[in-house]
Image (spheres, rainbow, N blue to C red):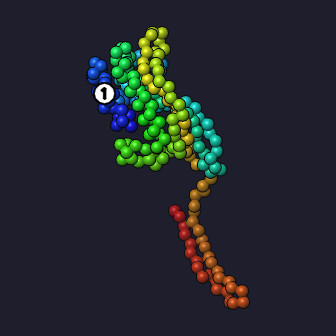
Amino acid sequence: MLRQHVGARLVAECSRSGLSAITDAVMYGAPYDVTPYLREAQFDFPLLAIYRMTARYPEATASWTRDEGEWGVDYVLPPLSASQAERIVPILRAVGVVIENRTRQGWDPSYRGGEKIVNTAAIDAIGLMSGTYGLFRAVDGTDLSFWGFRGILAVSERTSPVAGAFPVFAGADVEVDLSVQGQADLAHVADFKSDVP
């Protein structure tokens, strides 16, 4: 979504600002909070991190459970000079808008042919609850800062069925008799047996 809706403008502004190494809206993805590791050389910026923060396990029905929680979504730019920040930081607003809109819609026409997320993942509902724009600070004691967007997603996921709630169907042995008051009974109007291997 970010590549499709933010990428061209971001790459153009980065190129004008001397950051020609940025050729895509997302250069690195991570499934964890990257804040403690921002100074490590393994990252290419901008980076997108999406990770679980909290979980609750309410019972949806007697036979199906659900995991409701919050996920963090961080979009982090590389360290910028003041003149670079002036051109690039305003684009972070578009990042927040795209994430909010696409999660609320539950699909994007440019992602997997427009398939809805509920059809490809065990997600019942997802939406951006809040977001902040500002600086991510390196936690190594330096003054190095990274501009970015941090959002909190509310996510409801389907988890596996409750064990034993759906017994294995072994087959059926059915016999139907017809009885009408004052008339002769018809035995075995329908009779079938089905075994499931």
What residue do we see at 64% from left, 49% from top? Answer: 61
What residue do we see at 37% from left, 42% from top? Answer: 111
Location of mark 1 (residue) = 11
User: Where's residue 194, x and y in %?
Assistant: 55, 69
Judge by depth and name the residue closer to the eye, 12 or 154: 12
Judge by depth and name the residue closer to the eye, 166 or 183: 183
Q: What element carries label 1?
A: helix
Q: In this view, does 145 lie above or below 191?
A: above
Count of numbered marks: 1
User: Where's residue 30, x and y in %?
Assistant: 43, 29
Instruction: Tell me the kind of residue under disc 1.
Output: Val
What residue do we see at 47% from left, 24% from top? Answer: 133
Name, please, the residue furthest toward the right: 182
Name, please, the residue furthest toward the top: 142
Dot 1 surroundings within 10 Å: few (below 14), some, or many (20 or more)? Answer: many
What residue do we see at 30% from left, 27% from top? Answer: 11
Q: In this view, does 12 lie above or below 187?
A: above
Q: In this view, does 63 lie above or below 101?
A: below
Residue 141 is at least partly visible in this image:
yes
Q: In this view, does 57 lie to the left or right of 14?
A: right
User: Where's residue 63, x and y in %?
Assistant: 62, 51
Q: Is residue 41 left or right of residue 184?
A: left
Q: In which quarter of the image is residue 95?
A: top left
Residue 163 is at least partly visible in this image:
no
User: Where's residue 9, x and y in %?
Assistant: 32, 30
Q: In which quarter of the image is the N terminus?
A: top left
